[in-house]
Amino acid sequence: MYRTKALLGVLALVSVLIVTACGGATSVGLASIPTGERTYFMTGLEYKGATVTKDLAAPDQDPAKLSDGYRYKLPGKVDADPTKWEVSSYRFEPGVMQALVGDKVSLLVFITNGDKHNTWVEGPNGKEVVAKVAMSRGREYKMNFTASQAGVYRIVCEEHDPTMTSYLWALPK
């Protein structure tokens, strides 16, 4: 988690330096996006894979113990086949988005799988900018906020963090 935040911080700083070097919001590149409203269409996904133990040995360690974002069904728990096992991971797509400070951001999130995704948006200062929304499969949800400060906003699923986390970079104007 620390490495991810550090990398995002470095990338945000590089973006700010590019914007500054290019002359601000009127230049070509990252800064050419006009201030205003941003709408992002996101999907809550579950990646799933299954195999049988005669083809590939089941993991020695339960992947679900590595992260809340991973799931694992032991051999014989997927269906009647005692050799079949399954792993899955949850995530949001896109994983990274961009806005400018002052932009009104709308996230339209469609959940394709999973019964429970308590999701919120956290601002660069670590405070909640959108309260938890209980999301579940087959439905679309809208989360709105204004990117009022520069930095990284995190869109987080409580049940599947850290793999089900997306980032929105709010760059200075």
Image: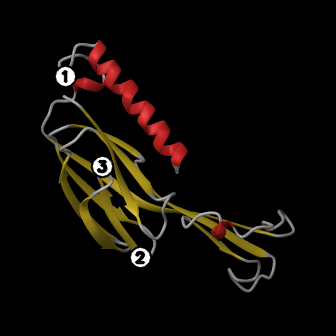
Q: Which residue is mark 1?
A: 25
In this rendered view, identify the residue nearer to me: 30 or 24.
24
Task: Say left or right for 92 vs 39.
Answer: right
Mark found first going from the N terminus, 1 or 2? 1
Task: Bin the neighbour count of mark 1 within 10 Å (Cα to Cα): few under 14, some 14-19, many 20 and up.
Answer: some
Q: Position of residue 17 (x, y in %)?
A: 34, 20
> Would residue 58 be found to the left or right of residue 144 on screen?
right
Identify the image quadrant of the C terminus: top left
Taking the image as shown, residue 93 lies to the left or right of residue 106, namely right
The disc placed on residue 116 is: 2
Q: Residue at x 30, y 13 (%)?
A: 21
The image position of residue 162, as x and y in percent, is 50, 58
Residue shown at 51% from the left, 44% from the top: 4
Q: Amino acid at mark 2?
A: Lys
Q: For residue 79, which quarter of the picture?
A: bottom right
Q: Is residue 85 above or below residue 154?
A: below
Q: Residue at x 19, y 22 (%)?
A: 25
Q: CA distance from mark 3 to mark 1?
A: 24 Å
Residue on which disc 3 sits: 125
Q: Residue 121, located in which quarter of the rendered image? A: bottom left
User: Could you classify mark 3 by the number of other residues whose Cα lies within 10 Å: few (under 14), some (14-19), or many (20 or more)?
Assistant: few
> Residue type at mark 1?
Ala
Secondary structure of the residue carrying numbered label 2: loop
10 Å neighbourhood of mark 2: few (<14), some, or many (≥20)? some
How many marks overall?
3
